[in-house]
Amino acid sequence: MNLNLFPLLYLWLALDAVIVGLFGWRQRVGRGENGSVRLVSGGVSEQVATASKLEQIGKWLKLLTMIALAFGVLLGAMAVYQSLNSTGTPGV
């Protein structure tokens, strides 16, 4: 059985592009974050909202990164298995 791995490779690359996009979005959202708490009116609630948004993006980023890593390892294993089992002699 000779499975075409290119559609799976494209899916993996698309997942990687989503991860890179999420990372860029997290960087953009975190750019305005300040590590110290400001006690001016509205400053604390804005910081809490930003921290909450960063936490949500971070959760998705970690989850998708783990999925992409596992998928990449599986895809690589499939490619190695396929190359080891291809004899190159039809009909054998």
Image (tube, rainbow, N blue to C red):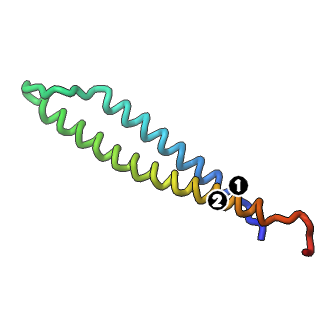
The quadrant of the picture occupied by the N terminus is bottom right
Coordinates of residue 50 in the picture (x, y in percent): 24, 36
The quadrant in which residue 23 appears is: top left
The crowd level at tag 2 (other Cα within 10 Å; few <14, some 14-19, many 20+) is few
Q: Which residue is mark 2?
A: 77
Disc 1 marks a residue whose amino acid type is Phe
Question: Is 84 on the left or on the right of 37, as rendered?
Answer: right
Is residue 12 rendered to the left or right of residue 66? right
Point 7% across, 26% down: residue? 39
Residue, disc 1: 6
Residue 59 shown left or right of residue 76 in the figure:
left
Q: Is residue 79 above or below residue 23?
A: below
Kind of residue at disc 2: Ala
- Crowdedness of circle 1 by 10 Å Cα count: few (<14), some, many (20+)? few
- Give the secondary structure at mark 1: helix
Q: Going by the image, does 60 lie left or right of 43?
A: right
